[in-house]
Amino acid sequence: MKQTTFTLGQSDMPKQWYNLAADLPTPMQPPLTPDGKPITSDMLAPVFPTNLIEQEVSRQRWIDIPEEILEMLAIWHPTPLRRARRLEEYLKTPARIYYKDESVSPPGSHKPNTAVAQAWYNKQFGIKKLTTETGAGQWGSALAFACNMLGLECKVYMVRVSFDQKPFRKTMMQVWGANCVASPSNETSAGREILKRMPDTPGSLGIAISEAIEEAVSDKSGKTRYSLGSVLNHVLLHQTIIGLEAKKQLKLAGEKKPDVVIGCAGGGSNFAGLSFPFVCDKIHGEEIDIFPVESSTCPKMTKGPFTYDFGDTAKMTPLLPMYTLGHTFIPAPIHAGGLRYHGMAPLVSQCIVEGLIKPRAYSQLKSYESALTWARTEGFICAPETSHAIACVIDEAKKAAQEGKEKVILFNYSGHGMLDLGGYEKFLSGKLKDSTLSDLELCESLKVIENLPKAKPQKTGKW
């Protein structure tokens, strides 16, 4: 029998997270205040606990994972590395396709890798309640799970379109004791203002972030903080357990290295979690093609500029150097809710500037077609976000066939789609449509950043 699953023992779990900021050829530009001054750590204190702020600004290459966090991660880690042999045979490709199966976590995605870490650090700091946003519901359910494990209260603002499309995500959060409301809501000033101007809006992650931050900073007791599921450095740091495990597992499979690394990218967390340890290898001389894959409905990496922008609609976050479509951008209501964020993580953005990674964009229909190919070969039903990565995998495997080259393709299977069957039903019945961002719409969306400080796309790398 040909081996398809490669597993590690719990003693082989990584004991440290990898921090790409230590190895970037060009240092990242700092977060700024609206008047262009660098953010100081004390300015972030009302939003994040000090221990996570220290990780956010750290340039230390390796950061120890506390034993208590390792014990929680061990509920589902190490996650399996699998080989997609049936897909390889279907595509008639010489490529060997591997995927890191993050769908085996209790919430069904990669998100609890950082959720348990953030909840633990907040509890150590004396925090009693966490607020957050969620797009498709994967992050909200992950934080609800983590808060339940650690005895924290959890409040989730879920983007309206996903709140309606994916009601069982809300149920998951409620099972773990969290309170989930549709965003924009009447519970915050930011939400009420949006509803006043756009009562029928499908919502956006930028709006939901504004609401969650507003609630956190409005708590007079000081016992509430905000928790973010993507974008920020410390979030991407926690996710690197994925790529660090994958490195060990590829060796078990008899592979020296991947030739191609792929992950879908909304804010950047699952892509970074898998790819950053391999980006490090590329910085130090390895030849690896690395592709972050976004939705063509929300194409910040492939159409947006690299500049400073706010991470949320109400401008409550610092200005971040990133690829963006403008903080007021509201994408069309595609089913891949986790890919509907207007900006890209600064660390991922700097990798694009350096030429270390090459973004791609895929449409909703193309991605669902790829998801069906995946389900009808490998058997698993993937999340709509993950289907974008699979679309890129299929293209790369076909390219390998055309070139007659053996390649090792590695991608992150970031979540299952068992709670996303409504989208599959609409696709199968022909009710789903593609939507693209026109140049006119892009120009209109970018007007909100015209008077903001400009990021300089500096690079020193050779890529």
Image: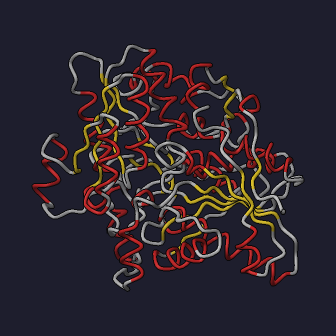
Q: Residue 395: where, in percent of width, then height? A: 68, 76
Q: Is residue 288 left or right of residue 347?
A: right
Q: Is residue 382 above or below residue 140?
A: below
Q: Quadrant of the N terminus?
A: bottom right
Along the line of sight, which residue is nearer the eye, 278 or 323? 278
Q: Residue 219: where, in percent of width, then height? A: 22, 23
Q: Quadrant of the C terminus?
A: bottom right
Q: Is residue 112 left or right of residue 437?
A: right
- Residue for point 41% across, 20% down: 42
Q: Residue 262: where, in percent of width, then height? A: 66, 60
Along the line of sight, which residue is nearer the eye, 202 or 150? 150
Q: Residue furthest left?
A: 196
Along the line of sight, which residue is nearer the eye, 254 or 392? 254
Q: Is residue 348 left or right of residue 119?
A: right
Q: Residue furthest front?
A: 1
Q: Is residue 2 above or below residue 168?
A: below
Q: Is residue 405 left or right of residue 103?
A: right
Q: Residue 302: where, in percent of width, then height? A: 54, 67
- Residue for point 72% across, 65% down: 84
Q: Is residue 103 above or below residue 228?
A: below
Q: How is the image coloured?
A: secondary structure
**How many badges with numbers are in the image?**
0
Q: Quadrant of residue 414?
A: bottom right
- Residue for point 53% across, 63% down: 382
- Residue for point 56% across, 60% down: 264
